[in-house]
Amino acid sequence: METVKGEILSIGTELLMGELTDTNSAYIAARAPSLGIAIQRMSQVGDDLQLLAGAFAAALERADVVFSTGGLGPTQDDLTREAISSALGEEMQVDPDLLEDLKAWFRYRGADMPPRNTKQATLIPSATTIPNNQGTAPGWWVERQGKIVVAMPGPPGEMYNMWQNQVAPKLKGRVRGQVIITRNIKTTDLAEADVAERIAQFAESENPYLGIYAKHDGIHLRIIGRGSTEEEARALMEPVESGILEIMGPHVWGFDDDSPEGALAQVLTESGLTVATMESCTGGLMASTITDVPGSSAYFRGGIVSYSNEAKIANGVPAETIHDHGAISSQTAEAMAKAARHRLAADIGIGVTGVAGPSEQEGKAVGTVFIALTTEGIVKPVALRLPPRRTVVKYRSVTTALVELTRLVRGLTSG
Amino acid sequence: METVKGEILSIGTELLMGELTDTNSAYIAARAPSLGIAIQRMSQVGDDLQLLAGAFAAALERADVVFSTGGLGPTQDDLTREAISSALGEEMQVDPDLLEDLKAWFRYRGADMPPRNTKQATLIPSATTIPNNQGTAPGWWVERQGKIVVAMPGPPGEMYNMWQNQVAPKLKGRVRGQVIITRNIKTTDLAEADVAERIAQFAESENPYLGIYAKHDGIHLRIIGRGSTEEEARALMEPVESGILEIMGPHVWGFDDDSPEGALAQVLTESGLTVATMESCTGGLMASTITDVPGSSAYFRGGIVSYSNEAKIANGVPAETIHDHGAISSQTAEAMAKAARHRLAADIGIGVTGVAGPSEQEGKAVGTVFIALTTEGIVKPVALRLPPRRTVVKYRSVTTALVELTRLVRGLTSG
């Protein structure tokens, strides 16, 4: 099967300042492979006609499909159309229909079209227009000698919309390259080395290929499959995915774009149950993550960030529990969960206590974390030993707590 | 003054998958201009010898200085040395001193050097080595016909260290280009349009150039100055910075890499004062942000996330206050601040209540936020009207609260 090669050009001097990140490239790079296009290079280029024309010409020599974002606005710094025209040696001409559409767009908003916008209504002989229903900048679809240039606007909202509704469907019918599909399996509780050992039997294969990535919210397993069609690629990946799910079982908490708080929102909304939290080492991140979901006030009663023993005791954790077992203990985590549940009148309480660093506490190492979940007649303890970095301790503890909570709610409602 | 042109190549197939972001380019792009190098292009290229050699050759034709990161490891996918050698037509040779250093590095760690690491001890005639005290991959400093190639390792920790200790000092003595300096002034409370209107008098200038950027934590004003030396650029920028500080006065909360929680940590640690929080619309983000700072347990007593009226009342907010004025009111914010201070025995209490969305509450629009700070004999209220997006409401409210808190502590201790 032939490889269809793709390149991405992100256009704009502001991308070269080191502050604004080019997110458009990542968006395209994540989606092109499933359409049969292998991205070989991405570049960020400033608003300079000569550099841009050279970049398009070189990319067209190496690649079959060239994507660009940015530089389609009406100002003199917007030079994408000029650069493509120069690279192909074709001349830009105003298209009367496009010009009428553009004038109508402004009229509809009660304004006259400024003269400088005229260049947004131009085409070259090899180009057709890609409609933009989010702004004034139509894209260009250019085909010449078997090669394709897709020029899209820079604002991500406009670009994503154009990709989904126009570019991806059109490419699907035109490109006959090897399709690459990705499936991301998200796990918790286990260290990278443990995960790697358990799924070692799948690590040797070239297609599907299996990658292991340590992320803020746990270890991700990425299966990458290649085939002449999406179905063929998926058929190769299926046994690996089933095998991993069988081996990793309860450690898997989600797939692809799933978030722990999103999964939790779904089960809590369905069940009508409510939750309250008491957290120390996560410092409020658990409550903040739960409340990142719009509508979370329907099921989140509230939380306590008990960053001192006094705060724990003031909120209902017995002083004896802390005295006898220490603040960093499964007993204190359980008392925190129970206190949160009772004081905030929730169906379920969660307690998290641990050592986020920089130094050990009560003789317990940085990364030691105890989580407890409780509801009527049930206490579920979880103990973690995480890498000793503050951010990792906070994020991984929150992921595990929310994943365990989702499991608990599923168990309660399916029972 | 001549322009010294720079390009950046980030090397590694994993950068083309759409998930791993290339942060090395942004790091270099943010620092090269102050050394007199104008970055004109950045590219991410996969581990393919032909593509890489072509990328180096083309960059060297266009630019005076080419930076690369990645591809210096010992595996067969690490092809940066090979690509540079091929682009320059020079032959790699093992350097006996480098090889001995590398073997010593392994010996020191109680291991034999694997044979494949030998290629990390190679050089070409135009290259000298850049020591790496964080890993096994030394960098290459290549000079030929007035052009420079700087090849650095891909892991950000190793790259940053090599940049700071080796590359930046060496470039300072070698490059004679126009210096570009950036100064970032961070403000809060005001909307982008308000800020733009107030500082309009500085917006026309080309050098220094003034940019306005709306960020999660408020509006940033970026002054960019150019000159033949750092001093010359700074002299041009100084009147603009002073002018902005005079006009924006109390709305400025920090510069460059400052964070609100970092500034707060400093004044609280110096003063020995402690803080407690009660927050609703920010959902725990305020506590989590405060506790992102290592050592925050010295001054942060704890927090309450009162996501329901019951949680507010259970934690000491009078039911009458909520009944009479509503949960979204300056009176409730004040009661929350006082309750947090008393219940958690802190010197200072902060309360934040507002509407994060998705829909209005008590007839108040999304983006309405009330903040109160209190200590013995003092109550400081702040009212905000933020853009109606959940993330923006959470982050901007937290920034304002922490900035106001820092000001309050400064006032208390300077008085």
Image (cartoon, coloured by chain):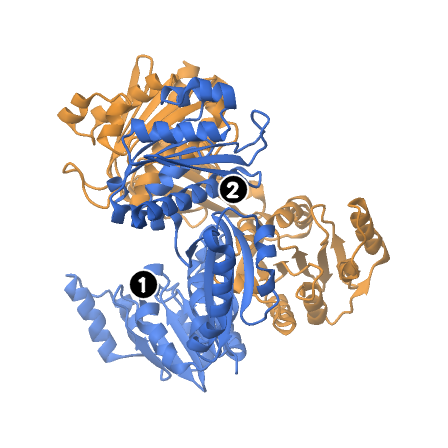
Chain colours: A blue, B orange
**Residue visible at 73% across and 52% down?**
B136
Residue A212: x %, y % from top left: 55, 57
**Viewer-nearest residue: B233 or A11:** A11
Q: Are marks 1 and 2 in contact (CB under 8 Å)?
A: no
**Residue visible at 17% across and 62% down?**
A111
The alpha-carbon separation of the residues under discs 1 and 2 comes to 35 Å
Q: Determine which quarter of the picture holds residue B93.
A: bottom right
Letter of the chain that mark 2 sits on in the rendering: A
**Viewer-nearest residue: B211 or A207:** A207
Res B10 visible:
yes
Q: Secondary structure at mark 1?
A: helix
Vertical comparison of B342 with B258: above or below: above
Residue A348: x %, y % from top left: 32, 36
Sequence-first disc among 1 and 2: 1
Using a 10 Å C-alpha cutoff, classify the residue at mark 1 as few (fewer than 14 neighbours), some (14 to 19) or many (20 or more).
some
The amino acid type of the residue labelled 1 equals Glu
- Tag 2 residue: A392
Residue B180: x %, y % from top left: 53, 48
Letter of the chain that mark 1 sits on in the rendering: A
Mark 1 or 2, which is nearer the eye?
Answer: 2
**Viewer-nearest residue: A373 or B167:** A373
The amino acid type of the residue labelled 2 equals Val
Q: Which mark is residue A258?
A: none
**Viewer-nearest residue: A74 or B105:** B105
- Tag 1 residue: A158
